[in-house]
Amino acid sequence: MIALLLRDLRLAFRAGGGFGLGLAFFLIVVVLVPFGVGPETELLSRIAPGILWVASLLAALLSLDRIFALDFEDGSLSLLATSPLPMEGAALMKALAHWITTGLPLTLAAPALGFLLSLAPEAYAYLLISLLLGTPALSMIGTFGAALTVGIRRGGLLLSLLVLPLYVPTLIFGAEAVRRGADGLDPAGALMLMAGITAGCFALLPFATAAVLRINLR
Amino acid sequence: MSMWEYANPRRFMGWTRPVLPWSFALAGLCLTVGLIWGFFFTPDDFRQGSTVKIIYLHVPAALMAINAWIMMLVASLIWVIRRHHVSALAARAAAPVGVVFTLIALFTGGIWGQPMWGTYWAWDPRLTSFLILFLFYLGYIALWEAIEDPDTAADLTSVLCMVGSVFAILSRYAVLFWNQGLHQGATLSLDKEENISDVFWFPLLVCIAGFVLLFIALVLMRTRTEIRARRIRALQARARRA
């Protein structure tokens, strides 16, 4: 399992494009928002939690179709299926690799972009915590979506149609936690519920992902 | 003889042929009676005036929009567990019907909301959950359309339906957490003595029965169409090979 994780990480770092692209996309979305809604600081600081969460969601979506597509095409996914490692473990590792290459950098970059959107100073800690707790769920759900569409040519658009509705609960709790933090309310409830979603996703979705992969490899 | 024998495609075609016109006729009868009764022979609500009458479309459509998804979930489970092809096809057939019911509920709700709340749309928990349900339906249908091999498509869509159901319920409660709304709570429930005044309740019941029957009729018809389409494909494949 560790070997698979390291292989995926190495591929993501060395193959180029995948790793930095999500971050650049995140930056561009956040930069575009003030052009769309106007430069008033108060308005921006009010919508900053939502913008940061939606942008990181889209950035995570961007790299989803790479999770299985290349391995499916060159046959290494079939090799993985015949290896002693259970498919569930492989799915989990794929999600983890996706999180380390997208979710973690997004989380670390988010406070800097929050500065651009003049996010309330009290909210930075909660932004960091909520993204740290929430982005793993995004990766796991996305891995499930990627497994569903792996056999479909040009499945990228379908992938976003399938995955984005599944992101709704995570987004609600994540953005709500940051918003409550910015307003000086107690965000613990939202954070706990979001942590629950993440834990539930990691407990159950590897099984669904593995089932779907087996169907697709049939 | 067990109930599963009715799932044999041949037998299914046999017993649905006589059932289908009857269910359409009954659905038409219930809807005609219920809507005419509701629209013309019930008093106006003392606060909402005559706008309350859209309830005869709005409530049954909303009810069936959710029940259609539950029916798809059950059909998907039957497909995964027992691999009856008719079950998978019925789930496929129900999805577009569910979408239409969801849209009817959203539109009639908007028309009702304009005079009552002063707005067609609000980011109210119930309204938002229905919009999310609509997106789930779209994804489900799109996945069916995208995959060529029918068995793979049936397998993948049933997994999506199961995972989607969990997330739909999660979204429902997450949305409650997110915003308090304008929509009233559940008025109709099975464990109450009287839900709404009987004057409105009886025509509403007839309309609900009409929508249920309409759903059954449409799903049966679409399932029959799917079975025929698959038979034609099989015949064409055989002709190509010969």
Image (cartoon, coloured by chain):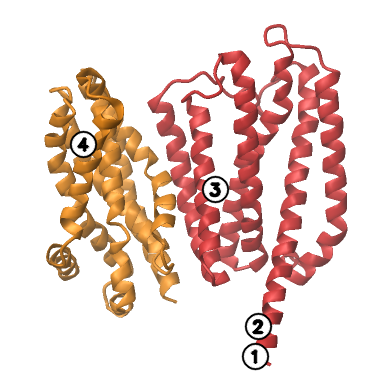
Comes first in the chain, label 3 or label 2: 3
Q: Say what amino acid the circle numbered 3 marks.
A: Tyr
Provide the chain ID for the residue under circle 4. Answer: A
Q: Which mark is residue B241?
A: 1
Residue visible at 41% across and 75% down in the picture = A217
Tell me the distance, in whole angstroms, between the alpha carbons under discs 2 and 1: 6 Å
User: Is residue A207 visible to us here?
Assistant: no
- Kindly indicate whether the residues beneath marks 3 and 2 are on one polypeptide chain: yes
Q: CA distance from mark 1 to mark 3?
A: 37 Å
Q: Are marks 3 and 4 on the same chain?
A: no
Residue, disc 3:
B137
The colour applied to the residues of chain B in this rendering is red
Q: Which label's residue is closer to the chain start, 1 or 3? A: 3
Q: Is residue A210 above or below residue B93?
A: below
Q: Is residue A72 visible?
A: yes
Chain A is shown in which shade?
orange
Looking at the rendered structure, the secondary structure element under dot 2 is helix
Chain letter, disc 1 residue:
B
